[in-house]
Amino acid sequence: MPRLSSSFVVRRTSAPASAPRAGALLRWLAAAVACIGIGTGALAGSASAGAGARTVQARSARAAKAARVPAHIATWAFDDACNGGGTASASLVRTWLSYAEADCGPTSSKARADCHAGRTHFCDVMQYLDTDWDLAQQPPIIADSASESWWLHAPRTGQRIFSPSAGGGYLDDQAIPAVRTFYTAFARRYYNSDDGLLMDWQSPSLSQELYYSNCGCAKTAEIHSDIALRRAHQAMAAALTRRNGSRFIQADNTLPPNPYTAQGLGMLNRSLGVDAWVVEGEPESFGTLDPYYSTLLDQIAYIATRTHGFIVPMSRAVAGASYATQTRQVQEGTMLLGFSPGHIVDWADFEQGSSNLAVWPEESIYPTRPVESMAEPGGRGCLAGTGTVCTRGGHTSVQVAPGVYRREFRACYLKRIAFGPCATIVNTTGGWVTVRSSWLKRRYRSQITLVGGDVQSGGSVDLGGASFRAGSTAVAPQDAILLSH
């Protein structure tokens, strides 16, 4: 079964007046020290030493603050030798990855070896698991253990719901306790020492769940509503625990890719075991920008403002693609628009077809002290699955023109080194857009440019790679720029 695709579409004082002036105060101090035999040179020397001490203290404070800033934003990538990261060293993985996904079956051990060393934990190992579709090319295979009641059936024919994907297979019924017991036993046997599970196809709606099936049906004989489907998914999420009863991190790989289907954002519930939503092919899929970009921003804003969970926007590209720079800029721009520590993870899967680890130098840009942020999205029909776009908060908090989004930060770091304010402007329209000075509250002189490729191949960022001038610099169609002071 292919992983969930975005192709799924259902349409900053003055001193008080009584304070002495600085000049008068200094003259009084000079006279006083002369009376007690201290030369003014000694006073000047003392003042200079004091200023020097203050400078050292300020530098020390800045260094201490930088040391507390992470070396990169939260990142996710394949590290399993069959989807990506096969040639990546453990050192590279440990330096750059937050979440290492394995999607090669129960015998895959690279991510585990790279992330865990004795009791030292460098990154979280996320194992791929599909507990919905039992497909021939995708373990675990439950067909040999299943009774007929384990399957979901078409309402008219009574036939099992089938998909020809990944060797073909059937859709199982997570509402059945025996099905949940089977998958829990599998996870405990093979993934008990791992950190989490990437749960594919935990769709919040039947239309999304049945998209790749051949039944042509809107519901199943057993599950008649989206609510019932979500209850079955939640029961599965709650059942998947380790042998000692502790919970895995669970990330559902099924955030709806458009505003027309049920969003199911309530499924993001730590008490039930679900910590994150993953959305594949957004904001970029092989050089094509998500046509529902504003909804993606609203989903990001909802998760950041209404939940304790996080979202993982996963853009895709073939390694070395001609559109790579544009795709990387849009992905990074989206990360900055939605940046909220603990609520967003960057999955820039731009090494498809390569064995390199898909981590990128721009991920070492860490923004702090935002000038503006997305508020909780709202408005009639907002994220209700009816196609209505949110009218307040969310994307509207950072929109400066139709389809154009901006966010600024007062203090930014590159590999923990402060470089001042930074910003992004994302242009989702089909035409060039000139940046207006009224869009920006800070002054910027440069565009941050991307040099080379991924981290493994020696790529880097140039904080002053190109000039920037508000009122003159333009952003290309469906592209983004990154700005520095």
Image (spheres, rainbow, N blue to C red):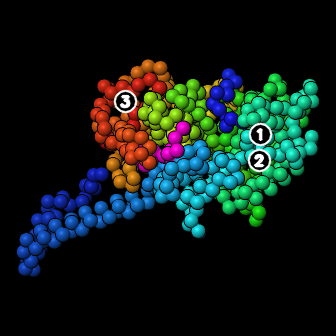
The crowd level at tag 2 (other Cα within 10 Å; few <14, some 14-19, many 20+) is some
Residue at x 57%, y 25% (from the top left corner)? 291
**Which mark, by number, is residue 388?**
none
Q: Is residue 143 above or below residue 403?
A: below
For marks 1 and 3 on the same chain, the one whose residue lies earlier in the sequence: 1
Q: Position of residue 114 (x, y in %)?
A: 55, 58
Q: Is residue 229 above or below residue 413?
A: above
Q: Amino acid at mark 3?
A: Ser
For marks 3 and 2 on the same chain, the one whose residue lies earlier in the sequence: 2
**Which mark, by number, is residue 140?**
2
Q: Nearer the viewer, residue 313 or 439?
A: 313
Looking at the image, residue 201 sits to the left or right of residue 215; the answer is: left
Cβ atoms at labels 1 and 3 below 8 Å apart: no
Q: Position of residue 389 (x, y in %)?
A: 61, 27
Residue at x 7%, y 71% (from the top left corner)? 41
Q: Give the quarter of the image for residue 427.
A: top left
**SS of the residue under disc 3:** helix
Looking at the image, residue 338 sits to the left or right of residue 195; the answer is: left
**Which mark, by number, is residue 438?**
3
Q: Is residue 345 visible?
A: no
The crowd level at tag 3 (other Cα within 10 Å; few <14, some 14-19, many 20+) is few
Give the Cα separation between the discs numbered 1 and 3: 57 Å
- The residue where tag 1 is placed is 136
Give the Cα separation between the discs numbered 3 and 2: 56 Å
Looking at the image, residue 248 sits to the left or right of residue 182; the answer is: left
User: Where does the magenta region start and end?
Assistant: 353-367
Residue at the far top: name it.
Answer: 431
Magenta segment includes 332: no
**SS of the residue under disc 1:** loop
